[in-house]
Amino acid sequence: MTDPIPAPALGEPYLLTPGPLTTSCPVKQAMLRDWGSWDGDFRAMTQDMRDRLLAMLGNGANDFDCVPMQGSGTFSVEAMLGSFIPKDGKVLVLANGAYGLRSAQTLAYLGRDYVLLDKGDYLPPRGGEVARILADDPAITHVVAIHCETSSGILNPVEEISRATYAAGRKLLIDSMSAFGAIPLEVSQIRFEALVSSANKCIEGVPGFGFVIARKSELEAAKGNSHSLSLDIHAQWAHMNKTGQWRFTPPTHVLAAFLEALRSHEAEGGVAARGGRYANNRDVMVTGMRELGFETLLKDRWLSPIIVTFFCPASPAFDFDRFYGLMKGKGFIIYPGKLTVAESFRIGCIGQLDSNVMRQVVAAAAESLSELGVYSAAPPESALIERAKLAA
Ligand SMILES: *Cc1c(COP(=O)(O)O)cnc(C)c1O
């Protein structure tokens, strides 16, 4: 086992949210100096970061390249969609939550033709469904999938989605924002053309940029596709490969922090160890919360090690805003729910958290419930009936 994770600075709460998240002291300290964006030292840092991210793809990574992009994760999603989908392309968007719907909305802004498979709040899009839709619509050129749909915490079956996509001769783009770095996405196992993630999720950096990892042949072919000067992945890639620099002002401090986070990621044991710690966080937290009577939205099979959705208790004494405030008072920032079917809230498992912290989270939840006068955390019957529809 690794050493226990040190607590954040005195008075700073733990963020049980899926990015921004609780970062380590060395990551924060890496931001205490200034870097010239043009300088060779900073260019070397950019290259180091790109190499380290590519190495996570495993065997076959040589066919891919990594292009960082300024902005929050959504900027990189928009950059990926606008750069790799030609203007006459057509996309099948697989949605089961807010991030899938956001990709569809982005395509609408970009004027790219798309069809939406909307599975609602939490049902996974399955390979068979993808195969049927692709067989019925030969105009579809690309499939967009969300790896971990952070709005419910479901881990979508990207492997079977990938198989169905390529069996039909189409191309896959993956929003792996909240999964990359903790859930394996090796190119020898799962075929795709491009993925997108950001600095402030499973690598545990601070917010400020995202990155696209794409097949070099797709990067070449992306020239001229983009609607946007600043979000043109091909242009950023070509400029970076030629000069070692970002096209426009880079988030220098964020990159310095991210490199530190990448070193810690490697020291911890890479993707497998990071994912293992998060899964352990989830297991300890879910077990404890279930003992209090809470129920998860998802069955164990679909529970990601990233974030978990719980139904709010049926008790009339429960009030989420007050529960949130009590949890915050004990040092834990939790996350409101994003479901349309039932009242819910979420607890993230990523960031500088370990099982010790997760036990404290459960203890804080127990105390907060009793302060509210809630004696059972059991959800309403209607929520459980809804959940029973998740047959798979
Ligand atoms: C965090 C996240 C994004 C990007 O969100 P931003 O707020 O723009 O950083 C996109 N997709 C998924 C699945 C995410 O978890």
Image (spheres, grey):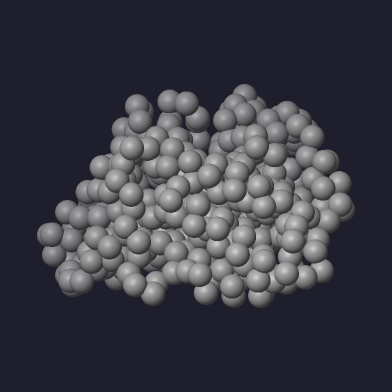
Please report the residue visible at 71 percent of the width from the left and 51 percent of the height from the top: 293
Residue 181 seen from this side? yes
Q: Please state if 303 lies on the left or on the right of 256 as rendered.
A: right
Count the labels in the image.
Answer: 0
Please tell me whether residue 213 is drawn above or below residue 207 in the rendered image: above
Please report the residue visible at 45 percent of the width from the left and 47 percent of the height from the top: 355
- Quarter where residue 168 is shown: top right
81 or 324, which is in the foreground? 324
Q: Please state if 317 lies on the left or on the right of 251 as rendered.
A: right
Residue 198, image x, y percentages: 42, 56
Residue 329, image x, y percentages: 52, 74
95 or 337, which is in the foreground? 337
Q: Residue furthest left?
A: 40
Please report the residue visible at 70 percent of the width from the left and 39 percent of the height from the top: 299
Q: Please state if 103 lies on the left or on the right of 258 as rendered.
A: right
Please report the residue visible at 35 percent of the width from the left and 61 percent of the height from the top: 7
